[in-house]
Image: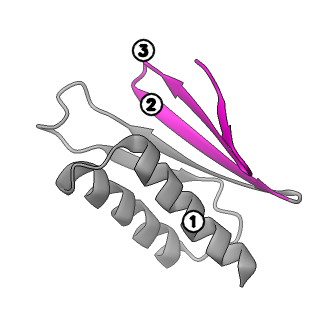
Amino acid sequence: KKATSFDEMVVNGSCASREVVATYHQDECQLSVMIKIPPTFPLRNVEVDCQKTLGIPSSRWRRWALQIMLMLNNQDGNVLEALLLWKQNVDKEFEG
């Protein structure tokens, strides 16, 4: 495991569990998303679990999770691009 920071977002990954967790810190708020990559990827789709949603409407979280899944499963995106898209969405949410 090695953590990488992108301003307010910290990304941790594990090769053994095939999971990538991004945690977003803004003031005293903390949001996180976990991407699970199955061993048979791309034959099976990645799974996105939005943890610590902190008052953001579930419909918005579902839309963000769907964007990540579409990018990784259908658009040949990589995990970093998907997490940066998620961060961009969260940034917009905090800006108002």
Mark 2 and mark 1: Cα distance apart in space: 21 Å
Q: Could you say whether the residue bearing mark 2 is in a helix, strand or loop?
A: strand
What kind of residue is marked 3?
Ala
Q: Are marks 3 and 2 in contact (CB under 8 Å)?
A: no
| Residue 21 in the image, given as x and y percentages of width and height | 55, 38
What kind of residue is marked 2?
Glu
What kind of residue is marked 1?
Gln
Classed neighbour count for the residue bearing mark 1: other residues with Cα under 10 Å, few (<14), some (14–19), many (≥20): few
Residue 1's quadrant in the figure? top right
As drawn, which residue projects farthest toward the top? 16
The residue that disc 3 covers is: 16
Depth order, front residue of 25/78 = 78
Residue 68's quadrant in the figure? bottom left
Q: Are marks 2 and 1 in contact (CB under 8 Å)?
A: no
Query: Residue at coordinates 17% horizontally, 28% vertically from top-left?
Result: 40
Depth order, front residue of 84/17 = 84
Instruction: In the rendered view, tell whether residue 54 sits above or below residue 10.
Output: below
User: For the magenta stretch, what is the residue range?
Assistant: 1-26
Query: Residue at coordinates 51% horizontally, 75% vertically from top-left?
Result: 60
Q: Could you say whether the residue bearing mark 3 is in a helix, strand or loop?
A: loop
The residue that disc 1 covers is: 88
Residue 49 is at least partly visible in this image: no
